[in-house]
Amino acid sequence: MSVLEYKMDGHVAVLTMTEGENRFNKTFFDEMEKILDDIEKEPEAKVLVVTSAHEKIWCNGIDLDWLGSLKENDPLEEKRFTQRITGLFKRFLYFPMITVAAINGHAFAGGAILASAFDFRFMRKDRGFFCIPEVDLKIPLSPSMIYIVQKAVPQYKFLEMQYLGSRLTADECVKHHIVTKSCDIEDLMDEVMSFARTHKKDTTVIASMKELTYKKFEKIFTEDDPVWFSSGRTGLS
């Protein structure tokens, strides 16, 4: 059964994560890479919207049980993990069309980092936190993760989130300009789709703009720590 699905609504590609907490593991990576390839090939696609089928969770980040099992069962895949998660974030950062995260529940850890890679974020106000709890998981953020979060979160708030693991509500995220709008859950997708349908920009131009915008940070992605999650600095060692 697929963990992701998408449909076209005019020029808007709506991708729904359908696997419970939508945690990052091999299946998630494999399907996400394929579905993003498919959306890029859609001639009418100008905006990508990503939401979740879970009633409480948008994305909870790394599948720690899966990652832990790799240490004994698949060391080669374990080594590839850092490259794949960095590649996932970078893929969304550079995705050649406007991207919108419709955050309809918790965005925790890698989920919050993933949301930060989007161009725009809308979030439900009645339930769900935006949080980077890696300090409590004893997993320091990699250089590329830090950059991506700082793209969306102002420095003063990023330091609080990183060092204290603070949980932000949708209204707090709006206050600090992390999300565009906080919405009641029944209005969230209507607000997101209204925004998305309004914008139909040339994807070639958008792709060039993103390449130029993030060009000076490209080195971060090519020289990222290849063993950040399994080194002696983390709670996963």
Image (spheres, rainbow, N blue to C red):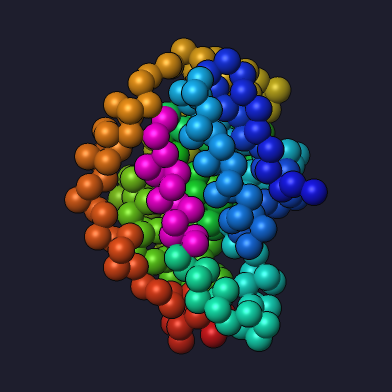
Q: Main secondary structure of the magenta part?
A: helix
Q: Check the image and report above or below for 207 versus 233.
A: above
| Farthest residue, direction left | 216
**Residue at image location 19% in from the left, 50% down from the top:** 216
Q: Nearer the viewer, residue 133 or 113?
A: 113
Residue 107 visible at all: no
**Residue at image location 42% in from the left, 29% down from the top:** 98
Residue 231 visible at all: yes
Picture mark count: 0
Q: Nearer the viewer, residue 163 or 203?
A: 203
Q: Toward which corner of the image does residue 187 lie, by quadrant? A: top right
Q: Check the image and report above or below for 11 versus 27.
A: above
**Residue at image location 61% in from the left, 19% down from the top:** 9
Residue 201 is one of the magenta-drawn residues: no
Q: Check the image and report above or below for 21 versus 125.
A: below
Tell me the quadrant of the picture where the C terminus can be found: bottom right
Q: Position of residue 26 (x, y in %)?
A: 63, 62
**Residue at image location 61% in from the left, 55% down from the top:** 30
In the picture, measured across the screen, residue 181 lies left or right of residue 143, that is right
Q: Position of residue 220 (x, y in %)?
A: 28, 61
Magenta part of the chain: 84-97
Q: Position of residue 28 (x, y in %)?
A: 64, 54
Q: Position of residue 84 (x, y in %)?
A: 49, 62
